[in-house]
Structure formats: C-alpha cells, structure tokens
Amino acid sequence: MSDIEQLKQQVEAQGSVVRDLKAAKADKAQVDEQVALLQALKKKLHIANGGDADESKKKGGSGKSLILKEPKGTKDYSPKEMAVRTEIFSTIVSVFEKHGAVTIDTPVFELKEILVGKYGEDSKLIYDLKDQGGEECSLRYDLTVPFARYVAQKSISNIKRYHLAKVYRRDQPAITKGRMREFYQCDYDIAGIYDAMIPDVECVRVAVDVLRRLDVGGFVVKVNHRKILDAIFEVSGVPQEKVRAISSAVDKLDKAPWTEVRREMTQEKGLEEAVADRIGQYVQISGPGEEVLAKLRALPELMASAKAQEGIKDMGLFFRYAAIYGILDYVSFDMSLARGLDYYTGIIYEAVLVEENVRLPTAPESSAKKGKGDAVDESQIRVGSIAAGGRYDELVGMFSSVMHAKGKKTDVPCVGISFGVERIFSIVKSRRSEAEIKANRTQVYVISLGDTLTDSLLEDRMRIAAELWDAGIAAEFAYKVKPRPQAQYDACDSAIIPWAVIIGKDEIGQGTVKIKNMAQKVEEEKGGVTVPRTNMIAELKQRLQMN
C-alpha cells in the first residue's frame, strides 16, 4: 500500500473519530484535539499529492487558517468555573492559616539539576526548557522540591508554609478525571526539628479539615511508613538496586489487582517469583491502625528489622495522636501505599474518595480506541488521589551540602501535604448546577425606569453607583444612556444579583429610591420598598447584613 493510500485511510478513520465524538456531544476540548489531528492528516495528504505546504496560494494570500485551541493537557476556565475555583482556594487557604502557616512564592522554573533525580520513574515527566541564558532549566514538577531548595538556600531552620501555584508534568492528560499537564497544587509543609510525629499528624488533620470543608464526599486517608515498606522489601529479599522500581509497582495496588502487580514485578522488573510472593503477604494488609500494628508486631521476621521497629514505633505514636485530633475514622493503615517519589523517608499518606457513586462527566471512547463491545474505561471516569504527602527529612540536606565548600550537609526535617486542586475542582463542580453558580460578587444593580426615548437618568445611576462603591457595596449599572427596563432586569437576573436600586423621574424629584429584592419574590414588596435617598446605604447594609 502506497503512502498516499495509507494517509487516505488515516484521514477516513480520524474523520470517523471526530464524527463519533460530536454525535456523543463530547467535551469541546476533546473534540478540538481530534479535529486538529484530522486537519494535520489532511495537510499531509495534500502535500503527498503534490500540493504546496503553504496553503496561502489556495486561499488568496490569506494564509493558513489558525486553529484556536488550548495546548493538550491545559484548560481555559469560564467565569463560573473560576468562581468555584476561587471558593476552593479560599477554603484551603483559610484552613492553612488556621493552623498558623505563612505563604511564600518560588519561580515557575528551576535549574534542571535541582529537579533531576528526585521523582523516581516520574522524572521523565519533567518539562525541560531550551537553554537561552547559559542555564539549563526545567518547569517545576511539584512545589516540594522548590520549597526544599528555598529552605536550604535561605538557611531556614524552621517554617510552616503554604504555597498555591501551578506545576507542570509531561504526562498523558485525562481532563475528565483531573489529570492535566498544567495544574495547581496547594501545599502545606512544616520544616524544622520537632518531636516525633507531632507535625506529621497535624498535616493529616489539615487534610481532613480541608476535605470536610470542601464537602467532597466520603474519603479515606491511607497511611504507611517508608521504613516499614523498606523493611518488607529487605526481609522479602528484594535486591537494593530494585527497591525503588518494586516500590513503584506496589504503589499501583490501588488501581490494579495483586496478580497484575506481581506480573509487573516478576516479568517487567525481573524479581524472583518467591520474593514477589513474600512481598504479597505483607502489602495486602490494611485496616484500622491498631489492628494493622498488632498484625505487624506478630510477624517475627519483620520485627527483627531495626527499620521496621522504628517505623512501627512512629505509627503507634501517629495513631495515638490521631485519636486525640478526632481523625481516626478517616484513616486507614494500608501497607500497599508506597508513593513513588524518591525523597520520602518516613510516614506517607494519600487521601482518596471512597464513594462508589462518584463519577465525573466524560465522553465515551471513540470506536478507534475501543474494540467491539468494550465497556467505557472506568479510569477515565473515576477521580484518583485528591491529596498526598509525607515526611522527607533528607531533601533539604541534599541542597545544603552544595552550599558548603567541604560539602557539609545540614538536614532540616520536613513533612507536608499537597492537594490536587484540579481533581477537587472536578468533584465540586460536578455537584453544582450551572444556574446556581454566581460568577460575580455584585450585590446591587442600579436600574432606571421611564421613557427610553426621553428619560436618560444615566448620571443619576452613576452617582448612586459611586455612592455604593464608596460605602463598600459591590454595584453595577447598564452601560447605556437610555437602557430598556426589561434589559436591566434581565441583566440583574442573569448575573444572580440579589438587590436592585430602582429610580425614575418621580424618585429623583422626591429624593427617594426603591430597593427591590431580586433573589426572592416578596409579595408585599413587589415593586420595591421606597426609602429616602439619605437612608439608602443604611437600608442596603442592613439587608445585606453588612456592618
């Protein structure tokens, strides 16, 4: 088959994909992405048939039509979506500040050498930038490594900080379940030398506080300890050079059955089957903290490990303090939790949804990606982890050592939690009706009534708006000299503005205004309540419950 024939078939197949998505009323971003692929294939076919790569000759010099779309794995947010996101950010920050945290900011890109070697197998997802100034840089992958660099560089011995910012990962995006290439993280970290598990349990308490305030539904915080996990690998016979690779495989047990994880360990990672089976006896243990601790303490081969003893001692303290903080019902001790990042040294945790009915809107997969009779991939519908973190005691020391001529290492122990805002947003937004979301903060709309041909009252509306702004009341009015009354009422309703100040020639002459409740239909106040203009601000503040 010639190249041209192959291209024709590809164009036909991609055209079917686009038609299927449109018929299924798929997400616009997904449709636009597939349309762009179709257009690229058509251009290749045009060139293969002897056409000019520059389409301008066919288009009378107008040039190639520009495809307007967001880059793959990114998203524009509408005013209503931003209103929801702003609420989420505000809620998270209020919890962080309730626990005494202060905020910082760091550059969106770091020196490449700062980031490499910190993320295990996920290091391949780092976005590298072109060298344009004598430095090799990369977009930040998370907020934790930049924070550790900040602490080391500034010689900080203790800080409780939060940071809300965008991070970047060269991942395969799945927008429907909140996995993006550009996304926000909200981090809360405690750096400093403190007594065992006190900051650690507070980080989990912060996670529980945030998720309860955001009302994401049922969730559980899985916890484990790197030292216990390392001890399991040690007593099971995992070679040291395979520990991180096997750890990454174990971390997939929340998404895949043990048989599949075991196959990855033995066939892809080259682990002996007997060693994999010994690991399986441990990592499938989970449940309430004290129950799991009792099971682990009853395993003599595990308790012979000094690492296991240290980890189990820490977790005993953790569950004791968690009971005091009233969060035990939200926590599960899960031995399969591994967290693939290389920098964790102690407790690790991850918050996941447990509601079976949590589903996010998604388009069915195209026929090009599904075999006949295949079901829709659940991984494209369910939302994964919504918060995660742990203890990383040596990351700051890795950076501080390079600041000293003799390579002196100064460790500043750290522990923290990071919230995946995109996934939380997907959940919260899916539970809200579009009609009930108020994108603006406007409290009052100033309306003028009268003959639109002769009565302007624009300057009166402007004076009232200025008076409202001066009093701290958010207000708007129509940007028309002679607006139609119904258009003003419609603008007020569509923007969900709760109150209106209404004026006409009579009100201006009498020095009064009418105040109307636009959110509720109050029969006795159908046309609005007339109040003296001098009392307008006081009356509105009372109705708005402002001091």
Image: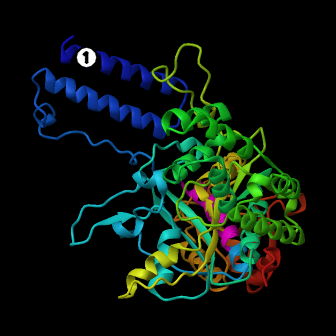
114 vs 523, left or right, is left
Name the magenta segment's main secondary structure.
Answer: helix
Residue at point 54%, 48% (across, down): 179
Dividing the picture into quarters, in which one does residue 131 lie?
bottom left
Residue 180 image position (x, y, % from top left):
50, 50
Q: Is residue 175 above or below residue 266?
A: below
Residue that protrudes farthest toward the top in the picture: 1
Residue 224 image position (x, y, % from top left):
71, 58
Residue at point 73%, 46% (across, down): 282
User: What's the magenta region?
Assistant: 78-93
Q: Is residue 532 visible?
A: no
Which quarter shows the C terminus? bottom right
Residue at point 74%, 77% (across, down): 196
Q: Which residue is mark 1?
A: 6
Residue 64 image position (x, y, % from top left):
20, 39
- Closer-to-camera residue (5/201): 201
- Closer-to-camera residue (429/434): 429
The amino acid pointed to by label 1 is: Gln
Residue at point 75%, 81% (across, down): 536
Q: Is residue 461 visible?
A: yes
Secondary structure beneath dot 1 equals: helix
- Closer-to-camera residue (470/148): 148
171 vs 510, left or right, is left
- Is residue 88 shown in magenta? yes
Q: Is residue 331 above or below residue 456?
A: above
Residue 321 image position (x, y, % from top left):
84, 72
Which quarter shows the N terminus? top left
Q: Is residue 396 above or below residue 235?
A: below
Total marks shown come to 1
Q: Is residue 512 above or below residue 216?
A: below
